[in-house]
Structures are given as C-alpha cells and as structure tokens.
Image (cartoon, rainbow, N blue to C red):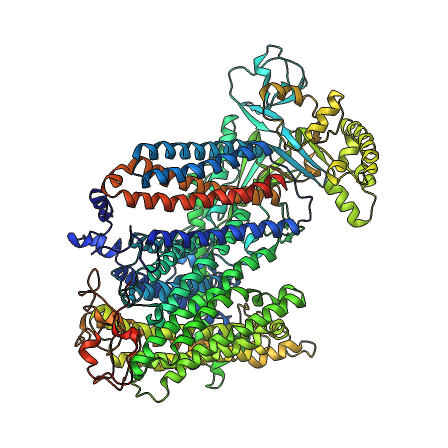
Amino acid sequence: MSAATSHAEHGHDDHHHDDHNPGFLSKYVFSTDHKTIGIQYGIVSLLFLLVGFFLMMVMRWSIAYPHEPLPEWMAFLFTEDWKARWLQDGMVKGETYNMFGAMHGTIMVFLGVVPLGFAAFGNYVTPLQIGAIDMAFPKLNMMSFWLYFPGGALMLASFFLNTGAAQSGWTNYSPLAGIQQSGAPNQWMTGQTWWLLAMVFLISSSLLGSVNFVTTIINLRAKGMTWMRLPFFVWAMLVTGFLLLLAFPPLEAAALMQLSDRVFDSSFFMPSGLVTGNGALEVAGSGSPLLYQHLFWFLGHPEVYVLLLPAIACVAEIIPCNTRKPLWGYRPMVWSVIVLGFLSFIVWAHHMYLTGMGPVISTFFQTTTVLISIPSVILLTSLIISMWGGSIRFTVPMLWATAFIPMFGIGGLTGLPLAFNLVGLHLHDTYYVIGHFHYVVAPGILFGLFAGIYHWYPKITGRYMNNLLGHLHFWPSLIFINVLFFPMLVQGMAGFHRRWYNGGDAYLAQAGESANVFGNTVEQYLPLNITMSNAAFWLALAQIPFIINVFFAWRKGKKVENDNPWDATTLEWATPTPPGHGNFTFDVSVFRGPYEYSRPDCEEDFLPQWHEPAKIEKDPSPTPTKEESKPTVA
Amino acid sequence: MDIPYTVTARKDTGLYNAKVGIWLFLASEVMLFGGLFSGYVFLRVYADFPWPERALPVVPGLINTFILIASSVTVVFAWAALKMRKWRQFQVYMVITLICAALFMVLKAVEYNAKWTHQAVRMNDFTVLEGHAHKFTIDDSGKIKHYHPGGHDDGHASNQFEENGMFLVADKEDDHGKSSGGGSKTEHYFNQVVFEADKITVDLERFYAPIISDLMEQAQKQGREIRLSKSVAGRPDAQVAETILAEEGDLLSLGLLKKLQGIHLDAKANNASVRTKQNREAWAKLRGGLSRKERNEPSYKIKDRLELDPKFDEFLVETSSSVTFTIEPKVTFVLKPQKVKEGPTSASFKDGTLLGGKLDEKHSQIEMAADAIDFRFVAQRAEEKGIDPELAIQNTWLMKNNETVRELWEVHNKHIAELEEKLAKKGKEPTDTERYRMGWQELVNIGEGKEVMDAFSGFAGPVHAIGEAKKSHYSRHFPEVVVPREEVNLESKFTPRWNNYYAIYFLITALHGLHVIGGIIVLGYFLFFGKKMYLNNPERLANRVEVCGLFWHFVDLVWIFLFPILYLM
C-alpha cells in the first residue's frame, strides 16, 4: 500500500511503481501487477480445488462405506473435538455429509474453478494478448483479489463454528437454507450466515474483476489490434466478463434477502404456515421460495458458462499452436460465443421444471435451452475440425486439450435430455444430473484449465513442466475420472437421489420384500458406489504428480530456449520470460490475425501477430489484404 | 510507462477508461436493483396478506425526491465549473450537493426511527393492531410498576412520564403509595415476557454466554444469588479418577460453566475416539477375514457380522451434559419475546437454557394505545372461506373482549354505510381499506366528533407522530387495547419482521442509502482533497467528478423508481 501513498505526492500519476524497488509486501502480496495477481489467484484457487476435492473424498467414503469409520488417512486432519461433534463414532453423520456437500459445491464453483479460469488465466494472459501494459484499473484489480481472499477464508472458517458450515446445498435453496441453523442463539455466528456474507465478498470481487476486464479489452488494445484480430481467448474473456457483470447482481440481491431472513427475521422466502420440527415458525410468512430459485438460477446458469468459457478459451489457444494450423472458423466461433453469452441469460428456468411451472413457460425455456446447443456445437466442432489434417504435436498441454473435447462432449450431450421438461422431471435431483454436470466441469473444464497451466507455465516461470510427471498426471486422471463419473449416469437413470448420504443404504432394509420394488433397484446398482469411490481415491493419487511438478519445475524444470518456446503467434509470447513490470520491451503493433500458422508464403510455420510485414513478406503471395499492410491507428 | 487513456479518450472508442468502467458498473447496478425490484413485484403479486398501501408519510418522501433531483443538478454544475477551471464555483456547487445528500439521509433516519418504534400485533384470528406499546418499570426488588395513559401532570415525577405524547401514570394497584426510593428502575415496553424463575438448567454443550450473562445481571440487580443445586462430578478421560468439579451451592459464573463445558467436551471427544478405534479395529478384522470375493461387498451386507471388542468399553467415561441451578428467592426476569419460548411453568432459550418457575401472565401481555385497528386480513380470510366478513369480525377476540373497540366499530360501520350511499351515486364502492380498517385519522375524527372520512383522509400517510403540540392532543383518542400473549400470532415493531412490505422497503432503501453514503464519501473526497489534483491535472479531476456524477444520477434514478412503489402505490 506504500505505492498508493506515494502517488498522492505525484498527484497526477497512478503508475510509478517502476521508479522504485517495491518491498516484499507490495511486490508479492498487495501487488497491482496483473501477472502477480493472476498468480495469486491461481495458487489460491488451486488450493481451494484441493480442499473441495478432499471434502468430496469424505463424502464418497460415506456413500461407499456408510457403516465404517473414516480411515485414519482422511480423519487425521480434524481435531478430536471436531470429530466428536461431527462424526458418529468415526462415521460420517447425515448433517456432516450435507455440510460437506454444500461446501464442496460452493468451494469448487465459486472459489476454485471461476477464480482459476476467469481470474487467474484472465488476469495473466488477457493484457498480454492484447498488448497492454497492465489492466485498466490496477488498484481495483488488487482489491478484487483481496475481496476474494477474505471471502474464501470466511467460507473455510465457517467449518469451525459451533453450527458448522452451511448445510443446504451449494444452491442454498430457501426455505431450507432459511431455517437451517435458525435455532442458534446468535444468527451472525452460523455457517449459513457466513456463507451469505462470504458470497457478498465474492460477488463484489467478481464485480470489480469483470468491470476491469471488459474495460481493459475495450480500451487498452494495442495499435492494430482490431476486434477481429483478438485471439479467441480474449473474446471468451470479454463474454465471461459480461456474464459475471450482469448475472451475479441478482444473486447478491437474493443473498441480501436471505441474510435479512436470517438475522432480521423477515419473510422474503418464508411461505405462510411453514412448520418445522420445532413447530410453526414465528414469522410473518407470505414469502416466496420460488423467488429465490429464480434469482439464484438467473446467476446459476450463466455461471456455467463463466466456468466453461475460460476453459474452452485455453483449449482454443492450445489447439492451433499444437496442430500448426489456424483455428478453423474463427469468426463463427466469435459469434457463437457472443450468442452463447446472450442465450445463457434466458435459459435459467430449465433448472426449475419441478417447481410446477405451466407448459407455456416450460416450452419457452425448453426451446431456448435446446437453442443454446447450437453455438456450443459450433464451438466444439470448430475445435475438432481445427485438428483435422494438422501435424499434431502431442505435448502435455495438447493431451489435456484433446481430452477436453470428448469429455466436454459427453457432458454436453448428457445435458440434452435434461433440457426437456418431461425427462427433466424424471431425472431431476438424481445422480444423472450429478454425472452430467461433473462431466462438464471436471473432465471438461478442469482438463481445459490444466491444459492452460501446462501451456503457459513456461511463460510464467521460464521453465517447462516435467513431461513424464505430466503424463503420470494425465493418463490416470483420464481413466479414473471416467470410472468415477460414468456410473453416476447409470445410477441416476435407476433413480438414485443425489443427496443420499449413505449411498442408498436406507432403502435396503427391506430389499427382500416384494413391496419394496425400489429397494431391489437400489440393491442392483449399489455396488457401483464402491467402484466410484475407489476411483475417486485413485484420482486423488493421480494429482500428486501435478503438485510435485508445479513446485519441482518452478526451480528445477528445464529452462525455455527462447521467449516463444511453443512457436506461437499471439502477443503474450512477445514478452520477456517471465514478463517484467510493464510487460513489453518494445512498442507493440499488431499486423495480422491471431492464428497465422503454416502460411504457404512464409519460411517458418508460424507468423506472429507482432512481426512487421516488410521483413517476412518479400514475396507477397496471393494478395495481401489492406488490413495486413499497415497497423490500424488506434 | 503509464496506463493509457486514464485522462484522454481513446480515439476509436471515444471513451476514457473510467467512463467505460462506470457504465459497466452501472449496468451491474441496474441488475442488482432490477433483482430487488422484481423481488418487490413477485412478493406483492403473490402476497397472501393485505399489502400496506401508503404506509409511509408521502410528504417527507416527496421532499426527499426533490432534494435528490436538486443534488443531481448541482453535481453537473460542479463538473461544468471544473471544465471551465473555476475552482471556487466547483466548491460551492459541490457543497450544495453534499448538503442535499446529508438532508436526504436525515429525513430517511427520521422515517426509519418512526417505523421501528411503532408496535404492531397480529392476533391469532388475524386482527391487526398498530400503535404504541405502554411501558412498565421493574425496580431492584423485582416489583413491577405499570403505566397507563390518562390524567394530567400531578406533580409526582416518579410515577409518571411522557411517551409518544401520552402522559403515562403509574397504576393505582401497583403503586403502593411509597416510591421505592433510591433504587434504580429499568424501563420496558409492554411486549416482554415476564417470568418468575427459581430454577435454571444450563446445557453445557450449547450455552451462549450473552444469554447467561443477561440472566445473571438481572438476578444480581434484584440481589438474588444463583447457586448450583447439586454437586457435579466428572473426569475427562478414563485415566483420571473422578473428581468433584463443582460443589453444591457454588455460584453461577461463566468461568464455572466454561470449566464444566471443557471437561464435558473432553470426555465426549475421548468417548468418540475410543468408539472410533473400536469400530475401525472391528471392520479391519471383518474385512480381513472375508474371502477375496466378499471383501468388496457393500458394508450393509456384512455389517451384521461386525463384532465390537468389549475391551474398549472400559475407556469410556461419563459426564453430565447439563447442570441445574436454583435461585432463592425467585427472580423476576424480563425477557425478549423473540429470544424465549414460554409456557406457564417453564421458559426455554435457543441455547438450551431452561427456566423453571411461573409465567407472570399479567405483565407478559401487550398493552398499547392502538392508532389503527385493521380487520382487512380477517375479512380477506373470511371471504376466502366463504364466510360473511362482518360476522368474522364480530367473532374476533378483540370485538368480544374490548368494549371501546366495539363502540368505535359501530360508529365506523355507520359512516361506511353513509359512504356507500354517497359512492353508489357515482357507481363506486368503498375500498377494502376504507371498509375494514380504522386508521389514526379516523380514530381521531371519531373522538373529536368530526366527519369521519374526508376526501383525502390518509393520503399523506401516517404523520400523527410529527408535530409535538398535536401529538398529545391526538393520542387521547386512541383506544386502549390489552392483548394476552396467547392471543398473539406475531408481534413486532414496523421492522422487516412485521411483513414483506417492510422487509423490501427496508432492504431497498437501506441499500439505496448505502449508495448515497458512498457517493457522499467520494464526492466529499474530491471537494476536500481534490485541490492538489486540480492544480496538477484539472482535466483528470473533472473526469473523476463526471464519472461520480454519473453514479450520482443513477442513485437519483433509483429513488425516482422507489418513491412511487413504496410511498404511493
């Protein structure tokens, strides 16, 4: 913060960091440099992913082995007092499972994947790719991180409250969320309330972030970087920025209303005549639980694309680079991503078919939901065709990017049935839904983001990540993640409910009796629980090479030979490695589109955006367009 | 190496960075308030209670609207002054802007205060009463003094005070002729639960220190001691011998409770860990003894074969999870009704603390001067069930038990009949509000023998609390109502708790108020600390004021939408 005070003396200038040597705090902690902030986001979000993964393992244990105590290797993390409160003789209690389930979702979505995809990659790569020296508002950028961090800390700290953390699912549906822990004497000290407070922090953080991204992309593009010369990554970030900007505020409204319900006893989401285990509630009533669902899913659906777009953006950068071919259908992809962003705002109620909406409304949402598959398929198809006939270099990032396509494909295709009202009613809240969106998020989005990490790591650190460890990370992950998620689709169609903390065990008591038909179905598919849970534990092991790799390569990895180790064309590879403060060492001008690979008129198989045409294009084959010959004035 | 376009506009976009930023931010704000406004629509459309209309004083709201519009104009003048490089003029306009903003907040605060001192009661039969609760005092001996409106200043200052324009005088039967002298008295509104307790049971795992402290404080004030009724023995784990942790007759203190809690939790953790080990060992043995094929069976299939080793049981310990204290003689506790669930002989708190004794029913009832008696909810529910609303009203507890209200209702009905006749000529009917609600204006008019309904009665909203002189004059006409606690369905001040109208009103206006305060801080910063920037780079300051001005216009615009939906509709 010393930087901030020194500004006051200069009065007119916001950017004098390069004049002095910043101290440790302002360089690594309260930094305003987009790259440092990107790395901060990256590290913290990866840690949160790890926490979310751990919560999932405890849940999977409870599902597969409901009568057995947690094994020592999972339980050692908890204190004795905590175990006495939250475990029943070492076994996971129902309420503990609910708590872990709610927090697994929350942490993975809001604290893990979004910050990693949008904030970490977006922060690091976007300004570099458009040739800017930093974000438009560096201090806001820092503030964005320092709102995200306490928000996440608050979420984690809520595990240690007397009431435990939030227990009503990551969607935090009212009135369940409103009455959950409402018996606590101090409402400000309950996990449910802290969840809401933490969400307010996170929403404010993403608001600052998205304003910053969009402004940066609109106003700080380098000379000659016209809209259609933007790398696809930047387009995806622009759309993601708009999604966050416009979709999150209604959830903030809902969070404030729910907060008011909790601490001021209002009835925004409390219907009349609500009776709980403790008798009738002493509230005014007349509230609307449906209102909460609308406000939540108005965020919730665009949020899916906030998760997805950064991943697909990484993949779209990596595929052309490793196939040495231009991205196929760049313009259709850009338009698709814009249409996708728009459509994502008008599909939200397909999460709510079970609320008893009328046929007119459900037909509308069914139609828009099916429509949104058109731009999605355009994106995915373009990526596949981009690989067609390329001389593919199967580097580790390319492996992840390649795997992204079929994995995300499964995720997308399994979503189609859910778009239809009738099927949706049947599959609602079953493991099918869990399988579907985990295919989208885990082997889909996370694979894309892993690809990004392996791809840009050399730029960030100046060293490659280890190849062997990369393979040891990739192949087991690919196998076990499928063993983990595919059986969920099967179980879901058999009717397994997503919130059974003992994996369906309760239905087995009278499985033998002929009246208990469902019990027989459950018994048939129950052993899959053990397969899936074991796959989850193996999947955890498969992440260890990655963790070792990140730290090992930081100091000991193979050094990059030059600033552009992948022979890529976009501007981030024009910077020194790692980029210093202010990023570029020359005055950036852009002369062409982002994916000029294997041009027949060039000696090399790539033509970076920043190379001046005079040097290379001595023999102007077909016809050089006007655009290419001189940079557009900006 | 500066970030470009912080002051000058980029040619192809025509905007400088901050302007792009503020428009994006405002877009986000539109979505935030859009969410809240759609919440308002949703809640109002689906409301199952009579939505309060014109429940707020219109005039102050209108004044606030004009104040904000004026400040939006002056903030533009301030910006224009900067553009013309006239610092002095900028200062003047900015000061006016800030004064307007401050005035807005003051009016808002007055309005808020009036709301959350206003008592409202919804009875079990859905009769709604609004008004001001009376007070009682409790002195050091636990004696309760009861205040009623009426009479005039009789010079005995200790027995009376003024509250909401009413002279409240101590009840004759409570007043034993002598004031209790030097001891301090605590005042309470008549909506508390009064409980005479001789026993307190504390849940060691869940007890909440502020609740215990409050009880201890009240007992101490009345000079009572809370002592342990039975010795407590225990041990944290099996290795330690059982010891007496607290003797019979020990005084209640947070320290004692925390000590006992610590031992209880240690014992619980000990037991949990012993049982976990026992289970783990048994499962390892069971799975180890199975054939290869059976080893991966779901646990439900084999769990019946589990054998727990009894050798672990000797490590288990037992401690009590709650302790009981006695109070000799009884203490009269005054408790907040939302914090406590009361019965005739016991009262329990949310943290598991339990009081034993007797409920003081007389002082736990709600005594108030009603400035509105509202049967709309009763009528609405009756109509839904197909019952004659008038019959339902006649059958309410209030009509059966309160003579004054019955008389008022007769007069009211007479006037409604007249009104009906008058309106019938124009082909209209009285509204539900006119028909089933007696508001403060009507009560006063009846009391003063005036025409009950004038054309604009109540248009300006409830303003009887404004204007000192009129206040006491009016309040004489408000009927006295006493509601026993068991007849109360919901009792609240006009806060978010009372109904969804107030919930959304407080939420949106508070959020809007926060935006106003944010604007005050930033604009104030430019006014008081902007001189240096002005001298260095006046254009930059002008840009900043412009951007903040855009925000200020947005805040104004929100209010322009808020005013009609909350004050007029």
A398 over B211 or under it: above or below: below
Asked whether, in this view, residue A42 is left or right of residue B180, the answer is left
Q: Which residue is at the front of the view, A218 or A544?
A: A218
Q: Is residue A310 visible?
A: yes
x, y percent for residue B7: 29, 50
> Outermost residue, bottom direction?
A389
Residue B164: percent from left, percent from top: 60, 24
Which quadrant of the figure contains the C terminus of chain A?
bottom left
Report the label total.
0
Answer yes or no: is residue B323 visible: no
Name the residue: 63% across, 70% down.
A363
Q: Looking at the picture, how far across and down is residue A627, in whole percent?
A: 30, 73
Picture coordinates of residue A167, whole percent (x, y): 51, 58
Single out the residue that lies furthest toward the left.
Answer: A20
Of residues B268 and A19, the one drawn nearer to the viewer in this rendering: A19
Task: Give the side of residue B388 with respect to residue B122, left or right.
Answer: right
For image coordinates 54% across by 65% down, the residue present is A346
Q: Quadrant of residue A223?
A: bottom left
- In this picture, is B451 found above or below B70? above
In the foreground, B262 or B439: B439
Q: Looking at the picture, tell me which residue is in the foreground, A184 or A37.
A: A37
Residue with the most extreme top position: B155
